[in-house]
Image (spheres, grey):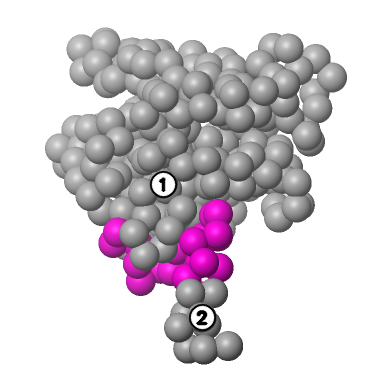
Amino acid sequence: MTIFEAENLQINFFDNKRMEILRHEEYYKLNEPIKQVTLNNLFARSVVEHKITGKIYVDNCENPGTFYVVHPYGMSLLFGNNHNETFNHSFRDYGLNINRSRNKFEWMQVFPDQWNHVLKALFSSCLIKSAENTTRRETGIIELNTRVNFKFDLVKYLNFRKTCPFPELKIVRTDRQIFDAMKGSVVPKYFWESADDFLENGVGYSLFIEGKLASTAYSAFIHDSKLELGIETFEKFRGKGYAAFACSALIDYCLEKKYEPVWSCRLENTSSYKLAQKIGFVPLTLIPYYRLSK
């Protein structure tokens, strides 16, 4: 084989790759493309900007045009060119977890909207609306949910804030001990590299009832002038309104530091959806939210 033939073979092999993992030092290639994404993408920016270790798949590492960003918590964003049939075919296998490359769900947003039409055709009969998944299948399907992006309404929040009995509740700044003690599915450790990282770059407020940690509201992501809220309440304290008060402490911090509070959740997550509206958030946009098979 000549050198010319060997080089051609290498080029052809590279071109036939469908989904490539982008090296961390090449994440800068998404700096401009991600600016075109107009929906809430703070979690994806955290990966792109090396605030947390995730994964980025592209159609071509040298000159990427299609991007799939995965946050370690399991949220993901698919954006860019949606006409790359080679990438799309590979992504179908990835979405259905054909090769069993992961052991948990990924919750995916897409941009622009044309991706939704592509995915509908790509997954065809495997795409099932959440309400229709009556047997609660978890594998071999893509479950279609809805994600809600909210807008913060200051007047609405201030009206709620008047009802907060802060003097009667113990709410403190989240420290290392609380960070380590928080257990649950939506806790700070899933959104920050470490306790040190959270304490240096994040913020949280924790509410105690009779000396016991009940609820913590914290910054899941902070970018520019936006702070996205996360909230976790221990099960025995749920349904009592404590989460709203913990969130109020964090929102007060946002107002003091000139951050815009950000809230997003699944429409199907009724507790989060109702909590957001209770503390001053107004539903702004509804978008398809895909649960990829595990």
In the figure, 19 relative to 196: above or below?
Answer: above
Report the magenta residues as a range: 10-29
User: Where is residue 231 shown, x and y percent of the image?
Assistant: 48, 35
Q: Assign a secondary structure to mark 1.
A: strand
Give the number of marks: 2
Q: Assign a secondary structure to mark 2.
A: helix
**Which residue is depicted at the point 54% across and 74% down?**
9
Q: Nearer the viewer, residue 152 or 257?
A: 152
**Which residue is depicted at the point 23% across and 50% down?**
32
Q: Earlier in the sequence, mark 1 or mark 2?
A: 2
**Which residue is depicted at the point 55% across and 28% down?**
119
Please name the residue that numbered disc 1 is placed on. 66
Q: Label 2 neighbourhood size at 10 Å, few (<14), some (14-19), many (20+)? A: few
User: Where is residue 17 shown, x and y percent of the image?
Assistant: 55, 60
Amino acid type at mark 1: Thr
In the rendered view, does 193 fall on the left or right side of 181?
left
Please name the residue that numbered disc 2 is placed on. 5
